[in-house]
Amino acid sequence: GQNIDQPTEMTATEGAIVQINCTYQTSGFNGLFWYQQHAGEAPTFLSYNVLDGLEEKGRFSSFLSRSKGYSYLLLKELQMKDSASYLCAVSDTDKLIFGTGTRLQVFP
Amino acid sequence: DVKVTQSSRYLVKRTGEKVFLECVQDMDHENMFWYRQDPGLGLRLIYFSYDVKMKEKGDIPEGYSVSREKKERFSLILESASTNQTSMYLCASSLPQGTQETQYFGPGTRLLVL
């Protein structure tokens, strides 16, 4: 079956580093997306991985291991505005399958 | 910049009413999607469309229908609204499969069915 797992909630301190993990089992794989969603707002695209390895984009990095069905999103130098939900989604042939999201709270 | 708009941010309807949720995108995207988002359940795909007049069922199509008469517009229809359809509804659009088909989301419609 199709399954995407990520932690429900995480907390971290301003200025710290946090890693949000995502494991997946899907029938097809055309890439993995990370989205950020602030409360009451629409998800916005953060990153896309289709090959194994690390993709870095400013304070955010995303890693993929296809053989392990595993990805993580790394957030560095955390800011208060990073408090949001982070959604892992796998592109399976013709559609995206979303995890339930990880709610990150950043404290001063 | 991709822009996806939805007709309403908040909507209150009564059980049994017919409800139309409209979505418009301005980037000439072939693909359009309707999701609902509920606490603890994440985003669930209701219907999607790859082209005008085409539609495909997602994971939870029961109680919903869709219409895509023009490329830029994708409508979600609740034929007879029920209280269990109270939810946040999100529309998205993307380029065709085979490209990096990042989905761009609209602001969402929070629907309350009384």
Image: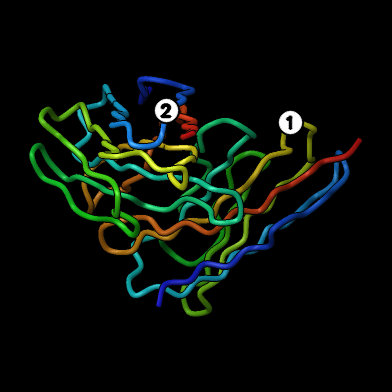
- What residue is disc 1 on? A81
Residue A34 lies, in percent from the top left, at 53, 50
Chain identity of mark 1: A
User: A88 or A60: which is nearer to us?
Assistant: A88
- Residue located farthest toward the right when viewing the structure as drawn: A108
At label 2, the amino acid type is: Lys
What residue lies at 19% left-to-right and 53% top-to-bottom? B56
User: A66 or A90: which is nearer to us?
Assistant: A90
Please tell me whether mark 1 sits on a helix, a strand or a loop: helix
Total residue callouts: 2
What residue lies at 40% left-to-right and 43% top-to-bottom? B82
- What residue is disc 2 on? B13
Measure the alpha-carbon separation of dots 1 and 2. Answer: 34 Å
At label 1, the amino acid type is: Lys
| Quarter of the image with the N terminus of chain A in it | bottom left
User: Do discs 1 and 2 share a chain?
Assistant: no
